[in-house]
Amino acid sequence: MYLLIALPVLLITLISVINFITIIEPKDPAFIEEFVSVIVPVRNEASNIHDLVACLKAQNHLQRAEFIFLDDNSEDETLNLLQQELVGLENFSVIKGAPLPLGWIGKTWALHQLLEASSGEIIVSIDADVRLTLDAISRSVTSLKNLGLDFVSPYPRQLTQSLAERLIQPLLQWSWMATLPLSLAKKSSRPSMAVANGQFFVVRKNALLLAGGYESVKSDVLDDMFLARNLIKSGSHGGVINGASIATCRMYSSWSQIESGYGKSLNRAFGSGLGSLTTILFLFITGVAPLVVALTGSLWGWIAYLFVVATRVLSALRSKGRLFDSLAHPISSIVLIYLIVYSWVMRGTIEWKGRTV
């Protein structure tokens, strides 16, 4: 029993330490001469429009850039607010999205239309709830160029307020910080090593088109991960970099949003039912079992628990998260296990932004 816990705990600790030391930070900004297209799909995002446009129009070190928004048939004031905010901004535009075709999901259909409308050599896709520092795009493009990569995904700092957010959201960064050697992944030709976050994604347009564009992930709820895999399959290289210093995102603001958001995607995150069961077992062995064993009076259990907490602390330091929340990792693991099961039970019935996914 102790060995079954000790080996995976030691492995994730080792990977976490290596990634903590080697994770790529965004490069200092250089003046970007390439034509950059910033594309932003929006649906029912009225509360985000003002701050979103403000952070994008403040971007610097870009010689040629266009900012294209697509209103994906919003049911609120999103389109009207966008049109008001963009008055007088010559390199900003908004297009009205076409009706959703059969076989597509809303976001990928919106991104497909935005890609067709874009003219840039480099495509930067941003979610409406992401906020960028003044040099976020230029630093990300500089990183792409200096590293000789075809795509980078600067992982934003995940802002959390409620208890549910604080339990679940830190696991986004921890999941890859503790399991994937990032220095190998960015040059790997294995799609299984792909890591990306569609909240902020930078890609060379020619590489994106070679991979089949957004049509290649038209029905994938986890479009960012599958797009990264398709890019690697087509010969491109890239991966995640630490975007915590240049971008923030409050992804969800309530338990109901978390349940729906993860519920729509987790059943597809691990490849199959067997993959989900394997993930649940991993979460139990590394997240729950050490504390259970520790509470029986085992010193080894406490040591394993502290090692796991240490992996969360390392992830929090890099992602600018709350260190204290690392202590609750066993509870976080239980909640994530629930969300995986919930996603399978409710698959195909969850509603997100007025659409069933």
Image (cartoon, rainbow, N blue to C red):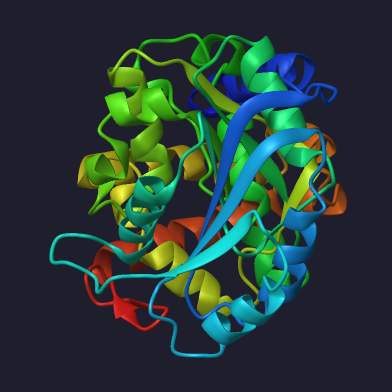
Total labels drawn: 0
Please tell me which residue is depicted at 45% across the width and 45% down the height of the picture. 118
Which residue reaches farthest left?
102
Q: Nearer the viewer, residue 55 or 243?
A: 55
Q: In terms of image quadrants, where is residue 21? A: top right
Q: What x and y, as percent, mark residue 340?
A: 38, 58
Q: What x and y, as percent, mark residue 235?
A: 33, 12
The C terminus: image quadrant: bottom left
Q: What x and y, as percent, mark residue 134?
A: 85, 46
Residue 174 vertical position relative to residue 263 in the rendered view, above or below: above
Is residue 303 something that shows in the picture? no
Please tell me which residue is depicted at 79% across the width and 21% down the height of the picture. 27
Q: Nearer the viewer, residue 344 or 28?
A: 28
Residue 116 located left or right of residue 44: left
Q: Nearer the viewer, residue 208 or 229?
A: 208
Q: Nearer the viewer, residue 336 or 31?
A: 31
Q: In terms of image quadrants, where is residue 48? A: bottom right
Residue 54 vertical position relative to residue 113 in the rendered view, above or below: below
Please tell me which residue is depicted at 55% across the width and 39% down the height of the picture. 201
Q: What x and y, as percent, mark residue 354?
A: 36, 84
Residue 73 located left or right of residue 152: left
Is residue 94 something that shows in the picture? yes
